[in-house]
Structure formats: C-alpha cells, structure tokens
Amino acid sequence: MTDSAGRAPAEPAGTGDGADDDNDAGTAASRPNRGHHWLRWTALGTSVVVLAAAGVGWWFYKKLDGNIRTDTTTAAELRTYEKERPTPIVLDAKNILLIGSDTRSGEGNGKYGQDDGGSQRSDTTILLHLAADRQSATAVSLPRDLMVDVPSCRKPDGTRSTAQFAQFNWAFQFGGAACTIRTVEKLTGIRIDHHMVIDFTGFKDVVDAVDGVEVCLKEPVDDVQALLRLPAGTQTLDGEQALGFVRARHGIGDGSDTQRMERQQRFLGALFKKVRSNGVLLNPTRLYPVLDAATKSLTTDPGLSTLTDLYELARSMQSVPTEKVQFMTVPRQPYSADPNRDELVEPDAENLFERLREDEPVSISPPPTGSGTESPKGTEDAKGSGTDRNSPTPTTAPSTDPSPGSTPTFEGSNAAAGLCE
C-alpha cells in the first residue's frame, strides 16, 4: 500500500534491520548449544572408553586371580601343630618354601613318567629368604636325597605315616606341603611363612611366556630320560627344553644331583633376570602371558592366594639388586651309611640356618675351579671332581672360616650372572 504520493508507508518500529539483528542474535545463541552438544558427546565417549578399559582390566584381573589354586588343607594341618612350630624372630623378613612337584598326573605330564595314581613327589625344594629390608634374597636348595627326621604326617587317605629318619622328598609324598613344611622347620628352626607348589606344565609355560632363556653348552646333551637333546653352543631354550635342562641327570655333566641343583639355580637366576627386564615388565602384551602362565601353575597358601597378594610380594622384591638374588645349596656331604644319600655338614649348615633365622647377611661366591660344578657359561667340564658321593669331601660349605662378627661366605651364584655371562 502507498500514500497519496505513491510512497510506501514507514515500517513499524521493531521490523526491518532490527529483525535481522534479532536473527543474528538467535543464530549466535545456537552456537554455544552446538558446542555443548559436542562436549557432552566427547565426555560420553570418554566415559565409555574408560568403562570399557576398566571392564577389560577387571576381566583380566579376575581371570588371573581365578587361576591360582588355594591350599587350605595345609593351613589347617599346620594349625594343629602350631605349638611345635618355630617362632618368627624378624617379623618383616619372609621365608617362602618353593616346591617343584614332579607328579605325573595332570594334562601334559604323563610323558615324564608313569602316573601311579597321582602320588606327589617333590623334585625340587627351595627355601627362599627375603630380607626384612628387601635388599637381598637368598634361595637355598634342599637336596631331595638329604637324610632328615620326617615327622608323623597325615596322608591324603586320612591315615598317618610313621615318624622316621628318611630322605627328604618322602615328606611331600607322605603328607604333601604340610609334611614338607614341618620337616623343613624341624631341620632348620626357620618359620615358614608361605609356600608355593609349581608343576611341570607351569614351569614350561612361564619359560615360553618370556620367549625362552639363553644357555651356553660346551658339549652336546643327550638325555633320553629327560627328553632332552641339545647341540653344543649358545642357544635359547623353550619351555619343553628348559624343563629337560633343569631335570637332566644323565648325558649332562657328571650325572650328580649336585650339578643338577646348581643348574636349576643358575637357570632360575637367568629366568628371574629376564622377567625383571623392561622387555617383560613394561610390556603388557608380554607381561600378561607370564602372569597367566605363572598363576595357572601355582598352588599357594591362603596368604598368597590372590593376585593382589602375589603382586605385593613381587613389588617388594623390585628393590632387591639382581646381584643380591643369591642361590646356593645347603652344606651337605655323602651320608656315612649310604653314599647314595646326603647328610648335612655341621656346624656349617646350622651356621647358615642361624643367619637366615636372624636375618643376617650371607655372602655367596662361585665354587672353586675343579669343584665339579658347571662353569659360569654352563659348560659341563671337571666331571666327577668334588661331586662323587663316595668322596668324604663336603660338596657345599663355607669358603672361609668366618671369624666372630664376620659374614660367612658360601658357594653359590647370583641372578646377575645369568647362564652365559
């Protein structure tokens, strides 16, 4: 509509350019809303990722935690004999009995021998002492043929064995871990705080999980009983080969249990060193298989029956210098009544046990050349010297006669040396 002059009438207030301003204001107001939407979606996505990660982490934790078998029977049996057990002297120190079971029952174990109804045997037993300040760890091998006082123990069928003077590994066969622990405590006067039992399959899986362990052999090895055949030279053993390597008694070295235990100690030192390396501990894709293999193979007392318990134990050992992770065999010699068995060398053995009870330091030095042990590079020379059971010479004893107040030195090795260094 126009006025008489043909001009359009003036637009009312609040229209025209003012309306454009209002539209601009509305558009500007919508921009923060879209920004808020993006923030909300980002927060929601982050929450989903965090929850998913937490769920996966929880699943892994529960799986690993569920792998561990808890031995409540041993704990109950030991409570029955609490009055006869040693009293701990240094509370922050820990003494853990590691038992390698060579039972042939279970999947994959039958090829190492006939399963005679699932009977238990302790192929390897190691007393591990962790110092209260966690600045040293001493692993003492106890020979399976050592003659000791084995107490009357409860058998799996509910009957009781007769207390007797017998070879050490009979204790595990009679009454499992409880009987072995009571035998060790009677022998050493050391209170056992925890125990772990590991079987053949578990050991193999742990070695495979760290991609094997390197060994050095001067001569080829051919041991039918241990299912082991290796060429001479440097090589990395997988789990199956490693099991044969630590079990072998024929076709390697002088065939003595002395060299077999020393070989086990050096291999465990090399395995410990590799597990502690950054390539395993800081790599989740490599660490998980190690944890999975280790937890699947373990039977422990209730005090170490959760992943948290084992983690705290492992974390407490992180501060132990590798060269202070020491391995040795209890001082012993051929048993006077039967050279195919062992007896303790006294007072050397008691001196060692007292040091561990009191949490006092123990020094380790390599055995002298020609002692019958394997060389630092895992060679099998000096056969028979010093390890003949018919020899009256002690196979493991302090290398010095310590004066009062000094630290005694025993023959042994440490984890820093490995097997090829």
Image (spheres, rainbow, N blue to C red):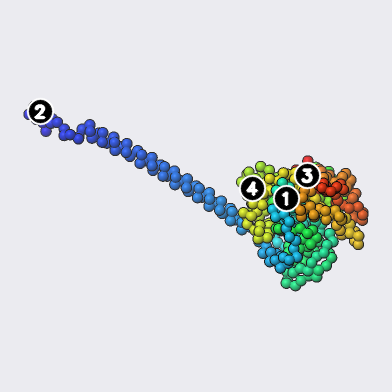
Determine whether the residue tagged by mark 2 lies in a helix, strand or loop. loop
Choose mark 2 or mark 1, whichever is in front. 1
Q: Name the image quarter holding the N terminus.
A: top left
Amino acid on which disc 1 is placed: Ala
Give me the C-alpha separation between circle 4 and circle 1. 26 Å
Which residue is identified by label 4?
287
Amino acid on which disc 4 is placed: Leu
Give me the C-alpha separation between circle 2 and circle 1. 108 Å
Q: Which label's residue is closer to the chain start, 2 or 4?
A: 2
Look at the picture and state if 67 lies above or below 34.
below
Which residue is identified by label 1?
131
**Residue 199 at x, y = what percent?**
72, 58
Q: Which residue is drawn at 70% across and 48% down?
A: 133
Mark 2: few/some/many CA within 10 Å (<14, 14-19, 20+):
few
**Residue 238 at x, y = what percent?**
73, 48
Amino acid on which disc 2 is placed: Gly
Give me the C-alpha separation between circle 2 and circle 4. 90 Å
Which residue is identified by label 3?
419
Mark 1: few/some/many CA within 10 Å (<14, 14-19, 20+):
many
Choose mark 2 or mark 4, whichever is in front. 4
Q: Which mark is residue 17?
A: none
Q: Which label's residue is closer to the chain start, 3 or 2?
A: 2
Q: Which label's residue is closer to the chain start, 2 or 1?
A: 2
- Does 295 sit left or right of 44 as displayed? right
Give me the C-alpha separation between circle 1 and circle 3. 25 Å
Which residue is identified by label 2?
6
Q: Residue at x 75, y 52 (%)?
A: 359
